[in-house]
Image (cartoon, grey):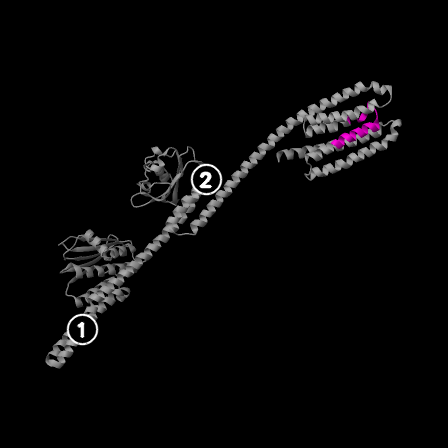
Amino acid sequence: MIKGQIHLDLDGMICITRWLFLSVALLVALVSVQTSQLANLPVIVYLTMGGVAYNLLATLLVYLKMYPDYVAAGSIALDVLLAWGLFWAHRSADSVLFFFCFLPAISAAVRFDVGWGLLTATAVSVGYGLPALFAGSQASRWAIPAVGGRVLGILAATTVAGLLSDRAKSAERNAVTSIYQAEQAELARLRTASERAKAIYELAGTLSATLNYQRVLDSVLEISTIGLKELSSLAGRPASMVLLFGDHGLYVAASRNLSHGDDNRIIPGESGIVGRVLSTAEPVIAGNLADDPELSQFAAFRRCRSAICVPLRAGFENYGVVVFANPEQNAYTDEHVEVLTAICNQAVVAIQNAQLYQTLRDERDRIIEIEEEARKKLARDLHDGPTQSIAAIAMRLNFTRLLLDKEPSSAKEELQKLEALARRTTQEIRTMLFTLRPVVLETQGLKAAVEQLVQKLQETEALPVHLQIEDLGDQLDVNLQAVAFFITEEAINNAKKHANAHNIWVRMYIRDRYFITEVEDDGKGFVVEVEKEAAVQRGSLGLINLQERAELVEGQLTIDSQPGKGTKIRLVVPFKGIS
């Protein structure tokens, strides 16, 4: 391509020079022709017009970029023939058309090389010298030495022109080559940038297409690996990982080429490269990782001699870091930093969405568990309470019917007992309905709802419940009232069923911008951790539900109990008033 462009430029210059030579040749011939040569003047004109014709065609072919080497050689051959024709028509040893010899000779040397130029110069010199030999006059024959001198001049000029042309073409070729290489390098850079943008675009599509938390993290490493490989060919086997903050530090959330032991490792993220990245929120390119206090704990990184670490950060919140390491030295550059930073910025948004989605799923599952536990509790309460009572009523009805036949006098007393049992069952059902939907809580507030709850419980139980509730008015948020009521009701039921308590105390008050609810009994107590484990094993979520209900209102629930010393359940919630 470069050589072809140079030849096209030379061919254009040769065509322009040919136009000049043809014009000058015709003008000189018209001015200098002698009387004895007038008969040959039309021949000179016709030859010049022929030169004009093929030069016109040559110029058109050059313009159309359809001028291969064989066409250029043919044009020079026609120039030689044209020169011969002009010399024979002019037939003079000191012909003023001598200058036309230089056109084909120098054209061949410039267009091809010195050898072709000398060959062409020899051919055109023969055409120039023969007319002098066959001129027929003694003067012309004696002019042969002068012709020889001119021929030597043609050969010398052709040689010089060829050498200068070769040097010029070499310099131009080098310059064009340099430009071509620079263009190719720029094209490669643009192609790399385009592929990088495409990879990031694909990343955005991949990350936006899924809300699966683990899939997002795996996609970050996969697309980052592709993006880094596009920038350079790394022979070493890189190791990479995503470190996210957990309860005890930074844990490996996703990895490539790490061992099983490395995948389970946790680091604090307070020193070394990771600590620096987290503190400055800026990416870092590092060298030998064997000296890093934290990353050297990973066996796969100890052999790595270069690394790049980029933060996963949104605003002022740090989620963790992404680390790529390679056994080669100086494997990563600023371009790698740009690519990985762009990918991590996209990934943070996807991680936030995935976390939010996972939180919603966990919340949904927790609500389902709570509802399932509520159904189980309702089924147990119905089985242990009204169901047993209704079964007892049915048995007593059958017994009363037999008494009416055998001992009518005793039937009245049995009917009274049956009536009392039916009333107690009715109260139990009403109490259960009240706890399922305490309408009074919505209409009259928390204090009235707890008082009514205790009143209904005491209609069926003789267990004293002592209330110490401040007049809270309408200061409490509706959700907080619902949670406090649920926890109070659950704690009272647990004390009634399991504690063998003689007294229960319920306290509700506001202190130092905190709303506090306490349910305390003087029952047998228990070891809290042991009871929690036992509850989980038997599938009971009562204590866990209490904790989760407290978290719904940003509260803290504590259970204080020891064997023989009763139990106190305490809910503490920051007081915000009505929302």
Q: Residue at x 61, y 31 (%)?
A: 173
Q: Residue 561: within the magenta?
A: no
Q: Position of residue 80 (x, y in %)?
A: 76, 29
Residue 470 can be seen in this image: no
Nearer to the camera, 19 or 554: 19
Residue type, mark 1 in image: Ile
Q: Residue 93: within the magenta?
A: yes
Q: Position of residue 134 (x, y in %)?
A: 84, 23
- In the rendered view of the protein, which quadrant contains the C terminus? bottom left
The disc placed on residue 53 is: none
Magenta stretch, residue numbers: 77-99
Residue type, mark 2 in image: Lys
Which residue is the site of mark 1?
393
Q: Is residue 40 left or right of residue 495?
A: right
Which residue is the site of mark 2?
229
Q: Is residue 340 left or right of residue 373?
A: right
